Amino acid sequence: MLVNRKLILAHFWLAFAVFGIALTLGAWQMFIRSPIGTWLSNPELYYRSLTAHGTVMGYVFPTLVAMGFGYAISESALEQRLVGVRWAWAGFWLIVAGSIMAVIPIALGRASVLYTFYPPLIGNVFYYLGVVLVVVGSWIWVALMSINLRVWRKAHPGAPVPLAMFANVAGSYLWAWTAVGAALELLLQIIPVAAGLKTTIDAGLARVFFSWTLHAIVYFWLMPTYIAYYTIVPRAIGGRVYSDTMARISFILFLVVAMPIGMHHTFADPQVGAGFKFIHSAFTALVTLPTLLTVFTICASVEIAARLRGGRGLFGWIRALPWDNPMMLALAFSFVMLGFGGAGGLINMSYQLDASIHNTQWITGHFHLIFGGAIVIMYFAIAYDLWPHLTGRELIDLRLIRTQLWLWFVGMMITTFPWHWVGILGMPRRMAYFDFGDPGIAPQALSVTLSAIGGFILLASGILFLVILARGMRAPQTDAGPYRFALAVHQPATVPVALNTHALWVGLMIALTLTNYGYPILTLALNEGTSVPAVYVGAQ
Amino acid sequence: MTARDLFTFRNRHFTAAVGITAAILIVTAIGGFIVLPFAQPWVQFANVWDAICSAAGLPQRAATVAAPEQTRRLSEVVLTSSTLARPNQEAIGRGATLAQRCAICHGPTGISRADSPNLAGQYAAVIYKELHDFRSGARTNAVMSPFAVNLTDQEIADLSMYYAYLPRLPAYHPTPQLPKPNIVIYGAPMRGIAPCGSCHGSLDNKIGSPWLEGQSEAYMKAQLQAFASGERRNDISQQMRNIARAMTPQEIDQAAAYYASQPPDVVKAVD
Ligand code: HEM
Ligand SMILES: [Cu+2]
């Protein structure tokens, strides 16, 4: 029962429009710092572009997808009109306003601080205020998801919350708490300096706050993808979810173990004690748990679909899968990229191994593979799946859709594998150009060129994606029927209260944040003399 | 089913979740704060508490190792973006009077006819820093040092504001404009050299770095060589020494010749 289609479409369109722009910038970055481009004589242009690319891809695009998808889930899984539609629009417009406010100083070269803010670098205050508006807009969504679930519970006392909504609300709570770290950094530290009230900043503390956000934000990006794995894919390929309980456990585990572990982003920072780094590292290792649970459950669910279609044998069933179904294809690509990306992630989270790839191109290669690859390809799939229900028109050209997914997958492989490789060879990230004429890095020229070619393939795929969606707005009308989510093999009649509510897990998430972050933040905040003078960018 | 049924140890999910989480936390804390510190044979701890404090990152005074003796004075100037940010007419006026002594070498309009640096329109923070360094001995020069020793803080600030206020005139080194050499536009990434302009004003200005357009070629070359040899060492954190050391003699020549031939109009103002 999708009633507020305009609202959802607005979120998706804005998300994909800014994605298209940021993607173009990404391809340009790839090209300009590769041996096939000429060196930029003003590296500041590169950082401008990089700030825009990172800010859009990291903050604006995934947040809008999560929000649009969240509204769709709320209406269709709960079969209840969205409560608070006006607020939802207010949140949307806040994001529009925030994005515009942030992008202007970036374009003028007054906020080339990169999306990680990099204090003591300080840019124009409107950049940060814009980011804050985006976050505030998304918090409205968090509140609405919670309220809608509460309204539903009142009407259905004791009934199991539909899995899609349970996961969606878990994701929204994760985001609410995750964003607090960067919000504290922005409001208490950066914005006072950018507004001219202070001229020094405690960069070490700021980095600790940012790590609070930076790790868990990736699980917020991941949420729509995981929701699609569990609740869309099995339905779309004619199977069932292997276990509803397993799914719930994965989502609540993300709340507990994905959140308070961000200090693996400060392994190289002297201001954090080694003991805390170890605790965070150990908890990071636990994140593999929900991921492995998911891989297992989804493979089992897919196998069910294959066997229902007459698949036989230990592995023979794989051939019986509906490979021409875009959802099947997207899932397979996503899993391959998740596998490689996850393996790379194990290296990042190990205190010792991380030292060899810290701040190298490996890092950018890694998160493009897992975020740009495994996660975003499922965003495409979600859009394809929802589009007919949102527009009332059919997406006819499945071949074009498959081509688009193939291009994204192949492009991402060609881009990110050499990208990892040059990282291992020691090439630093966030550099506007490299002297490939120097014998020291001449052998890396080929890899970087390959990456750049991959980048253009990705750009082509992204454009194709937008074209498919745009054409879908004008296709012949159909009645796509109500939007449904996958059913479990054993649809639960009752669910234990711990797995039907979020309170326990949100409580554990906050408690662990206090134990894992409390002491480091307090000592840094109370220590005198840890601030350094701000460095203003583009303040000419 | 209410919160009361959930948040109680009678609910086995609650007990299990809290128990397992707490157990993992305790085990990892013991690992991180006790086992691992002692597993480092090269660090000695007085007792367990000492190890815990160290692993927690409690700031401690470093052991009794004495700081290495400084044989030469280093710059003690602290520059922030608000240093001399607000020039005022009175200070500029006083600076103009004081500057009469400087004119023999630096020119009556702040443009030198010898190989002394031009000062007209230079960033105020730069003049401020160099004068302080000459006064403290962090930078020495047979001609400049005697002038600087007797300046008061106020006089240094006045002079800085005066020279910053003077218009940027074309230099007295009428060479044809040279094309940009690579070392200037790109630096040398493999040697850790950023493009000159990223600090020296044509792309961006990092506080304390002078703009260089139109300075004397001989002067700039001498300074780069002095930085490279370590004879001049008043650059904070060795910023210029690290760069000059990594430059080749040809690059030093090219950069000096290029900047000497440039008009001052590409330089960015500070806000
Ligand atoms: C949905 C897909 C993508 C996402 C979510 C994404 C996200 C990001 C983020 C968050 C950054 C970090 C910015 C920073 O270091 O400050 C980044 C950097 C970068 N991205 Fe993307 N990106 C995506 C696609 C692409 C594509 C397709 C390309 C190439 C065609 C690309 C090229 C780059 C480059 C070259 C950098 C800079 C790396 C560096 O210099 O350190 N990105 N991206
Ligand atoms: Cu992380």
Image: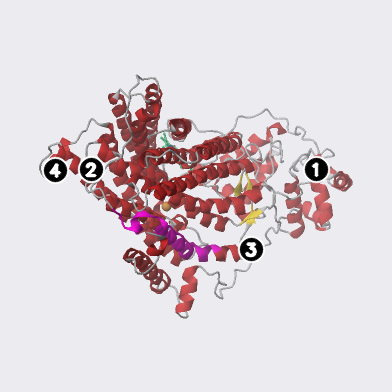
* Circle 2 or circle 3, nearest the eye: 2
Helix, strand or loop for disc 2? loop
The reply to the same-chain question for discs 1 and 3 is no
- In space, the residues marked 4 and 2 are separated at their CA atoms by 19 Å
Q: Nearer the viewer, mark 1 or mark 4?
A: 4
Q: Quadrant of ligand 1?
A: top left
Judged by depth in the image, the label closer to the viewer, 1 or 3, is 3
**Residue type at tag 1:** Tyr
Q: Which numbered disc, 4 or 2, marks the residue closer to the eye?
A: 2
Q: Mark 2 points at which residue?
A: A240
Q: Which amino acid does label 3 sit on?
A: Gly
Q: Residue placed at 86% from the left, 47% from the top?
A: B91
- Quadrant assignment for the C terminus of chain A: top right
Chosen colour scheme: secondary structure
Report the amino acid beneath label 2.
Arg
Left or right? Give the position of A225 relative to B145. left
Taking depth in this image into account, of A76 and A47 the one nearest to the observer is: A76
Instruction: Kindly check if marks 2 and 3 are in contact, taking CB atoms under 8 A apart as contact.
Output: no
Q: Name the residue under label 4.
A: A315
Question: How far apart are labels 1 and 3 at the CA level?
Answer: 34 Å
